[in-house]
Image: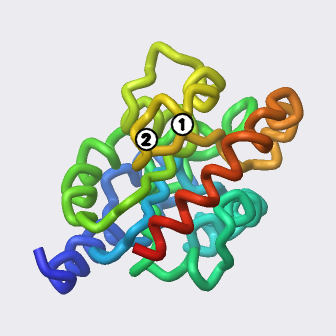
Amino acid sequence: MSQAELNVLIAKVKQCQLCQSSLTHGVNPVVQLHANAKLLIAGQAPGLAVHQSGVPFDDASGERLRLWLGIDKTVFYDPEQVAILPMGFCYPGKGKSGDLPPLKICAATWRERLLAELKRVQLTIVIGKYAQDYHLGTATQSLTQTVRNWADYPRSLIPLPHPSPRNNIWLAKNPWFSEQLLPELKCRVNDALKD
């Protein structure tokens, strides 16, 4: 598929209404894709601020994620370098202890078709339990187990917790994440983007 054909597919994604009846705040699919992207961020679903702006990771989570990756906004928002493909494309709404899980219809309808067009991706950053279960087959493990075992996965995949400020307690309880994983993450991101 050419980039022009991929752009047509992306336009269809951005016009998707499949989950409209399930979302009281409306639909606003948020993705960032280009066939030349070398880094893929496979996340959960947009939060409310991203739903409102239409810009992926346009919030405190995005600031922390860019810090973890060691890249600035210019690189992060360049679709020819960084693809952003969450498990759910629209904000799923608020739950009792944070946002609701991503709606499964997005992945079932679009994910494989879009991933198939990202042939130049060198590194996939797998953020959160839902993305990890899909990409790493970790349904029987906790998020902490999956992230702690990051070195057991292929070099082309790195699992991360969500960079949300809600995870400050998790980060404080798991100092190995900052000490061991983040330096390796920055190296792999740098290597992927310079290839």
Which residue position is annotated with label 2?
Answer: 103
Q: Which image quadrant for residue 142? A: top right
Counting from the top left corner in percent of width and height, residue 18 is at 31, 53
Farthest residue, direction top:
140
Which secondary structure lies at badge 1?
Answer: loop
Please name the colour scheme applied to the rendered image.
rainbow
Helix, strand or loop status at disc 2: loop
Q: Position of residue 185 (x, y in %)?
A: 61, 52
Q: Kindly identify the amino acid type of the residue bearing the numbered disc 2.
A: Leu
Three-letter residue code for mark 1: Pro
Q: Which mark is residue 30?
A: none
116 sits left or right of 29 in the view: left
Q: Nearer the viewer, residue 111 or 16?
A: 111
Q: Are marks 1 and 2 in contact (CB under 8 Å)?
A: yes
**Looking at this view, is 118 or 15 the one in front?**
118
Identify the residue position indicated by label 1 in the image: 101
Q: How many marks?
A: 2
- Residue under the image location 46 percent in, 63 percent down: 84
Rendering coords of residue 138 (x, y %): 44, 23
Residue 192 in the figure: left or right of residue 177: left
Q: Where's residue 170, x and y in %?
A: 80, 31
46 over 7 or under it: above or below = above
